[in-house]
Image (cartoon, grey):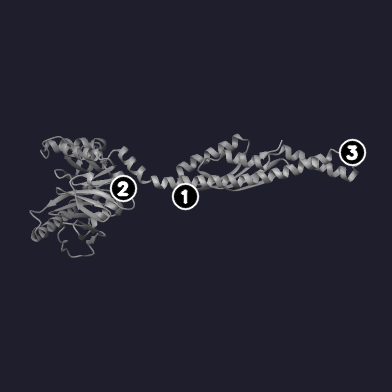
Amino acid sequence: MPAGPRKGVIDLDGVAYGLSGDKLAYVRGLDEIKGDKYYVTDLQEGLARVMTIESPVKYADLMVRKQLQDTGEFNEPVTVVTHWKKAKGGNTSEIFFTAAPARLYNRVQDQAGQDENNVLVFPLFAVLHGLLRRLRPADPVAVAFQHGRYVDLLIGSRERVYYANRCVAFDASPEQITFLWETVKNEINSVEADHQITVARVYLLNWVDSGAPPEWPDSPERRILTLEESPVVLDGQTHFTSLVTALKMQSGRWSISSFREKLSYYARRYAAAANVFFLLAALALFGGYVHYGRQADLIQKDLNAFEQRLARVRQPAAETDAQDFQATAAFIKELDYCRRAPSFRQVVEDMSGALPVDMRLDVIKADFGAREVGLELFGRIETPFDTAYQGYQSLLDALKSKGYAIKENRLTTEITSSRFLLKLTRGIK
């Protein structure tokens, strides 16, 4: 989900709410919330389940759809959205899914596609599963979302999903809500018995129309935890709801929207940050250009001084004594060495020409020996490891092609940047 003010439409129990920051309002369509947004829907006529299917895992979705229609749970074409699946061995698979009539699923996708902005669509159980992924519990836990006369229940761990279902009361009266929570408790107990597990924690989520939380005794065997609540204002009244907190923990990759929609959503989200990055990169390159330009000017001054000394050497030999001649011979040798050896300016130009755009040299150390020039380079790469490694290999290849021998190279990587140390030599002919 995007940073800053969060925008979205939450469609629960036939009522659509528009959320912008901490403001909540009743809406009739997605277009009433301007800008990029997410769309959470409970797909009213749909259902969420965990099933064991006699099928290879890659065909589990198809087999679920066929079974739902064969058993009469859907008397029309059905769409199955897979949240999680796993092979159990042999020809058996486990799958956690949301199923809905194809006409309803297509209508939701059409509404999102027709919006002038980017919309990421999340079935409600995808949101609960996203929360479970963020919690990453080693042992099984339950996530229970109560809204109106419903409780959507999901039980699982970071490795597996055991159970998903919606529990329903006749109405939203206090007596029926109490009975509803007893049903949820019995469901959790049944899952524990069926799978030989212990559900040690139950995370409660609420909405603006939620009833009282369950009056279950908190014990070491089963702790009841309420997810942090966020304030929202609806019709001038402030409500505290943990569903908004859960939405902030979602990732766009869990959405059922198309890849193009997700790409467009996040491209626009990070556009401002990308512009800042490229501006800083341009400033860094300009700074490097100024720095190495000054170094080149200093080298040019030294070369001019050598040329002036050479002009004095060209005076008639009769005008010089033996001591001057020895000094002149030494100078000629030095000058010959300078002409055969690569200049520091040339070295700098070789390094700059070999560097990819995302690499920066912090230190260049040159040691001009009798037969070779030794170099030490120290710098950094401001990109993730995969890109950094490719750029680093490109740098090594470019230096080798310019006649430099790699004596030592080190690449130290971190999450978003890397540092490198290179020791090179180049022979003097």
Name the kind of residue labelled 2 in the image. Ser
| Spatial separation of the CA atoms under disc 1 and disc 3 | 64 Å
On screen, residue 351 versus residue 135, left or right, reads right
| Spatial separation of the CA atoms under disc 2 and disc 3 | 84 Å
Dot 3 falls on a residue whose secondary structure is helix
On screen, residue 220 versus residue 399, left or right, reads left
| Spatial separation of the CA atoms under disc 2 and disc 1 | 23 Å
Binning the other alpha carbons within 10 Å of mark 3 as few (below 14), some (14 to 19) or many (20 upward) gives few
| Comparing labels 1 and 3, the label whose residue is closer to the camera | 3
Q: Is residue 383 visible?
A: no
Binning the other alpha carbons within 10 Å of mark 1 as few (below 14), some (14 to 19) or many (20 upward) gives few
* The one of 159 and 405 positioned closer to us in this rendering: 405
Name the kind of residue labelled 1 in the image. Glu
Residue 11 on image: x %, y %? 19, 48
Residue 375 on image: x %, y %? 64, 44
Q: Residue at x 23, y 42 (%)?
A: 95
Residue carrying label 2: 251
Q: Residue at x 17, y 53 (%)?
A: 193
First in sequence: mark 1 vs mark 3: 3
Q: Residue at x 56, y 36 (%)?
A: 397
Residue carrying label 3: 317
Residue 335 on image: x %, y %? 77, 40
| Comparing labels 2 and 1, the label whose residue is closer to the camera | 2
Name the kind of residue labelled 3 in the image. Ala
Residue carrying label 1: 414
Residue 366 on image: x %, y %? 66, 46
On screen, residue 186 versus residue 279, left or right, reads left
| Comparing labels 2 and 3, the label whose residue is closer to the camera | 3
Q: Is residue 210 visible?
A: yes
